[in-house]
Image (cartoon, rainbow, N blue to C red):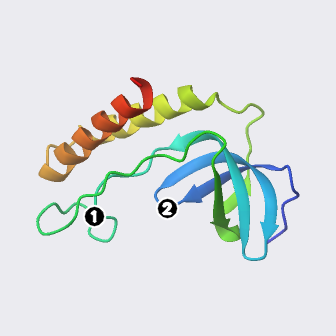
Amino acid sequence: MSELAIGSIVKAHYKSGIYVGEVVEDRNRFYLVKILAVEKHPMQGDLHNPGKTDGVFFHQRKALSYNEKANIQKEAVHPYESSSIPEYKESLAQSIETLKAKLTRRETEFNQQAYKQLEDLENQYFKQ
């Protein structure tokens, strides 16, 4: 795996979300990445028990914020291939809509609960 230079624009997988960001520091096994856009919103619920709602704590998972910095394992950071970086709020809104559409394909208790969590997050993100 080739090292990425400080200032490189990257696609970074962090927990269950995917982000566009800038490498700001090399920290041995990790890159410190400044978040610029959201490509895939994090999934809701208990990641260790996907699809389950009974007997698990159903987590509400926020996307990383604009300019938030995260330590991300080098294996999960790749060069960003597009020539333009989406605007953060637009990318966040699009990632929520994409996840909502996925959750409405099948009517399950998990999908319904995840959808409600996303609606709540959407209010937190955009109605403040």
Residue occupying the point 78% across, 76% down: 28
CB under 8 Å between discs 1 and 2: no
Residue 41: image location, x then y, percent: 45, 45
Quadrant of the drawing holding the C terminus: top left
Question: Is 8 in front, or is 125?
Answer: 125
Q: Nearer the viewer, mark 1 or mark 2?
A: 2
Amino acid type for the residue under numbered disc 1: Pro
Instruction: Using residue 104 as the reference point, say whether residue 98 is left or right of it.
Output: right
- Which structural element holds mark 2? loop
In three-dimensional space, the C-alpha distance between marks 1 and 2, rounded to whole angstroms, equals: 14 Å
Amino acid type for the residue under numbered disc 2: Lys
- Which structural element holds mark 1? loop
Instruction: Using residue 101 as the reference point, say whether residue 29 is left or right of it.
Output: right
Disc 1: CA contacts within 10 A as few (<14), some (14-19) or many (>=20):
few
Q: Residue furthest bottom?
A: 28
Quadrant of the image occupied by residue 84 = top right
Q: Residue furthest top?
A: 127
Residue 6: image location, x then y, percent: 87, 56
Q: Which numbered dot is residue 62?
A: none
Quadrant of the drawing holding the N terminus: bottom right
Quadrant of the image occupied by residue 78 = bottom right
Disc 2: CA contacts within 10 A as few (<14), some (14-19) or many (>=20):
few
Instruction: Using residue 113 as the reference point, say whether residue 102 is left or right of it.
Output: right
Instruction: Read off the residue under disc 1.
Output: 50
Q: Residue furthest front?
A: 128
Residue occupying the point 35% across, 38% down: 121
Residue 16: image location, x then y, percent: 46, 57
Q: Earlier in the sequence, mark 1 or mark 2?
A: 2
Instruction: Read off the residue under disc 2.
Output: 15
